[in-house]
Amino acid sequence: MRIHTDCAPCLMKRILFQSRLNEGSDEKRSVEDSLKVLAREFDYGRKSVDIATEVHRASYAVLGKDPYHDLKVRADEIAGRFMDLAQRYVDGSEDKLRACLMVSVIGNIMDFGSTGGIDGPEEFEPIFQRLMDQGLGLDDSDRIAEVLDRPGTIVFMFDNCGETQLDKILIRYLRSHGKRVVGVVRGEPILNDVTAEDAVRSGLDKELDRMLTTGTFYVGIDWDNVPADLMEEIEGCDLIIAKGMGNFESLSDEDLPVPVVHVMRTKCKPVADSVGVPQDLNVVYCRVYSG
């Protein structure tokens, strides 16, 4: 997805948020350096995630390796409290795949500091049921159902800590139907996205047949620097499930050999417009890329 005018204030809102996470951080320098990079890199012909990555790189150079660490730990703990309730919802549903996706997609609200997200994991509890009641505004779950009747691999690209707890329910369902699930986490800490260290801490790694990383510091996945083991899995899989807007923004211009199902909440207008739906919708959106 190309950069949009709406991306500039959204990006700087996130920079300010992360600059204030930890006492003693140099908020002013983080914001100043990030603004300079944004001004230098902003170009309507470029991918939004390319620019966002460079802006965050400037901020992290000031703030340190993982300013979101404590927030991610809290998010996993709080989201974990909802797993029993979410599993009961799935168990009582006639369409269990759709129910698993519903549970997974509402976790995508745990995108701290972003436009359309929430600012802390404690805000998730009071809106959990409201998000569930909204249902899926776009439902391409049938594309996932199509691959469940045969052995094969699903590549699952994760997004935020917290929501990955609820992703476990969907992963268990897929594996119970004979699918091999390869999970993809971020190569380095960026935003509140899950890394290998976070996955081990939360037990996410134990839910997977294989865990790989994107290999780099990047918002989403950097297609110019995809690790060989990850590309091999992508080329050999039946389907990619990509969680969240960062993965959508990095995937939407790429021609891939398999269908991609985007499981996310359309928290901003540019992403919503790209999908062709209203903002603030829960979506399971399949896109077939023609190479």
Image (spheres, helix red, strand yellow):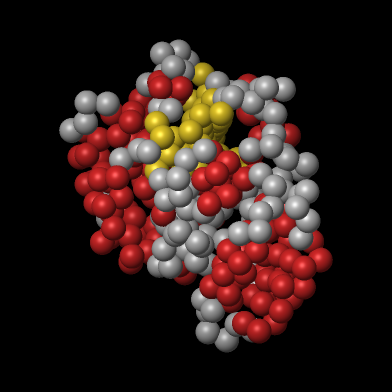
198 left or right of 64?
left
Q: Is residue 257 visible?
A: yes
- Is residue 66 left or right of 215 when viewed as pictured? left
Q: Report whether 101 appears left or right of 267.
A: left
Using the image as rendered, state which of residue 234 and residue 18 is in the foreground: 18
Q: Residue furthest right?
A: 40
| Above or below 123: residue 96 | above
Is residue 216 positioned above or below 104 on the image? below
**Residue 155, x across and y down, in percent:** 55, 32
Kindly identify the residue that appears in the image at 26 percent across and 52 percent down: 130
Q: Position of residue 164 (x, y in %)?
A: 43, 48
Q: Is residue 96 above or below residue 168?
A: above
For the point 40% across and 43% down, the residue is 282
Residue 10, x across and y down, in percent: 58, 64
- What is the residue that sits farthest to the bottom in this orientation? 24
Q: Position of residue 154 (x, y in %)?
A: 52, 27
Residue 202 visible in image? no
Quarter placement of the C terminus: top right
- Who is closer to the viewer here, 211 or 216? 216
